[in-house]
Amino acid sequence: MLITGLLEKNSGKTYLAAAILYALRKLGFKPGFFKPISIHNWFTDYDTTLDNLRSKSLYCKDVAMLSQIARIRIPYELLNPIHFLTAPLDPCVFINARVPDMYYSFSYDLLKTTIIARFSRYEEERLYNIYLFNEWALQRNILLIDEEILDRITRNADEVLRVNAIKNFVYLMNKNFLNSTHTCLKAIEDKHHVIIVESYSNVAWPLPPQIQVAFVLAVSPGRVLIYEASKFKMAVELKKPLRGLYTNVKLSDIIGLLKPVGSFKVGPVHSAEIPESYAIRKYASVVNFLISKLEKLEASF
């Protein structure tokens, strides 16, 4: 099943994923987890950066947390095949160049703030990690970075590519996206028959186009909407750019084309709460609904 967000930030996807994973594990389903795309800023998400340094890799903190909840012993790169490491822009560069407005426009542009993008694929029973360096941004000194951190995080890379032009960076991103997500998800599918896919932000479809899901859950603070998967994917196909990826479609682009088949109110979660608490109480209605649907699917096979 796929979980995505109605909002760009703080929709509640990870708490819902944690509640579902916990409940499924307790019922003996042996669930898997997959987060195709993630992003973190090395400076503002420094706790995650420190974890990355210890493991000499790039991944998001949610993957580590959800792996522990589901008791999955799989490399984080397999569960999270694509990760972008971003950096804060240096405002002084823009002020001194007398283009202060560009500081704000660049701040919302992933291609301008990315330092490194990791793409992992699974082939011949092993992970292969490619790291793309955004030399366009690095050469212009517009980002506040720590060279030692970049060196330590990429020490286990199988291949490092330094990309000088934005258009080439985009080309390599698109080229590696499908292979990374498809091969890693296939490896996880071989180990788990129920997989929770958590999208990034409000990206409607973070998966290769050929992948099918049983349910789509769209999350907002206090509410979870259930969509029929086939109609949801059809709406994504209608809004997809002619030559672009499905990941270009946001939930806001398609929400007007769809009607949810179910809706559940959920409660707020404190950061110190454990999954056992909010899976049983605050997410009980949606978790029970999904479990009943999964049990019916299991019985039909």
Image (tube, rainbow, N blue to C red):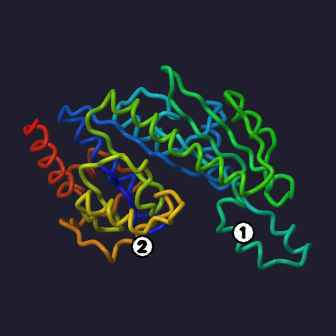
Please provide percent x and percent y for residue 133: 74, 45
What amino acid type is highlighted by mark number 2? Ser
Seen from the viewer's position, the closer of residues 282 and 93 is 93
What amino acid type is highlighted by mark number 1? Phe
- Residue under the point 23% across and 60% down: 228
Q: Taking 187 as reference, is 286 above or below it? A: below
* Residue found farthest to the top: 125
Please provide percent x and percent y for residue 73: 41, 26
Task: Say few, some or many: other residues with alpha carbon within 10 Å of mark 1 (under 14 / 14 to 19 / 20 or more).
Answer: some
Q: Which mark is residue 252?
A: 2
Element under disc 1: helix
Q: Which mark is residue 106?
A: 1
CA–CA distance in space, label 1 to label 2: 22 Å
Q: Taking 260 as reference, is 157 above or below it? A: above
Element under disc 2: helix
For marks 1 and 2, the one nearer the N-term is 1
Please provide percent x and percent y for residue 292: 11, 48
Please provide percent x and percent y for residue 206: 44, 53
Q: Taking 191 as reference, is 206 above or below it? A: below
Seen from the viewer's position, the closer of residues 83 and 16 is 83
